[in-house]
Every structure is written in C-alpha cells, then in structure tokens.
Amino acid sequence: MYSFMGGGLFCAMVGNILLVVSTATDYWMQYRLSGSFAHQGLWRYCMSGKCYMQTDSIAYWNATRAFMILSGMSCFAGIIAGILSFAHFSAFERFNRSFAAGIMFFVSTLFVLLAMAIYTGVTVNFLGKRFGDWRFSWSYILGWVALLMTFFAGKN
C-alpha cells in the first residue's frame, strides 16, 4: 500500500511543479503579429522582445488564472495530506488522510480541467480567428500534462 501512496505522491509533486510552471510562464500561445513573433501567457504577453502585463480584466483570463491557482493550492494540500498519511497520529485515527489526499488530487484535476477548457475554448473560437498564424505552446501543454499527473495521483 505504501508503494502506491509513494507513487501517488510522486505524481502529485510532479503535477504541482508543472502547475506552477505552467501558470507562471508566458508561453501558452505563440503567434505572428505584424511579421514578428509574439507569445502570451496568463499574466503577460511579449512582442518584439519586450513583455507587457496583461492589464485587461477579461472574464476568461480571470477564470483561467483562478482555476489554475486553485488547482495548485488543492494539489499542494493533497500533498500535505498524503505526507501526513505516512505518520501515525492517534488523534487522527478515524480520519483517513490518504483518502483525503486522493480527493484533493481529484479536485485539483477538476480545477485544471476547467482552466484548460476555458482557455482552449476562447483561444480556438476568438483568439485563433484574430491571429491567423498561431499555435498553442509549451506552457499550455504543461497544463495538460499536469492534469494527467494530478489525475493519476488521485487514482493511486
């Protein structure tokens, strides 16, 4: 049983790192704008070697940011609960910490799924039509990999 818990914690730790990196970096989408390459993340966009803050308070940006942050926080809480499940405290005998950790990992999976679905839908239907030559980039892909890692962490 401990090997499954250890594997789940490993998946959760990798997933949490990927969530943080995906949320913090500026390569969710790359596109050409006026002949030069540009890229954007959840917090900044960069054109011609200069980066600018995303100052627009658009609902889908805020929803994606919020769900990614909530996903990272619930994954971290699941990691703490998972680590505590290895310890044996008599005060918490009736509280199944490994079950709670699994629930937190599934909640994290749900939040990252919502964030990725919102971003994908808006990008394909709105931004993709605005920029002719565009593609999703590595920060976006890390978000999907983090979704898989948190799911498998909860499954273990």
Image (tube, rainbow, N blue to C red):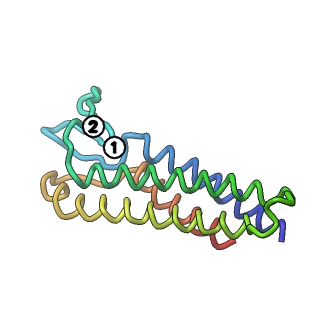
| CA distance for labels 1 and 2 | 6 Å
From the viewer's perspective, tell me whether residue 89 is left or right of residue 18. right
Furthest-top residue in view?
A: 50
Residue 75 in the image, given as x and y percentages of width and height: 58, 56
Identified by mark 2, the residue type is Tyr
Tell me if label 1 and label 2 are in contact, CB under 8 Å.
yes
Classify 75 as above or below 49: below
From the viewer's perspective, tell me whether residue 72 is left or right of residue 50. right
Name the one closer to the observer, 107 or 44.
107
Residue 21 in the image, given as x and y percentages of width and height: 50, 44
Which residue occupies 68% across, 52% down? 80
Classify 37 as above or below 153: above
Residue 58 in the image, given as x and y percentages of width and height: 20, 48
From the viewer's perspective, tell me whether residue 118 is left or right of residue 97. left
Identified by mark 1, the residue type is Gly
Q: Residues within 10 Å of mark 2 (few under 14, many from 20)?
A: some
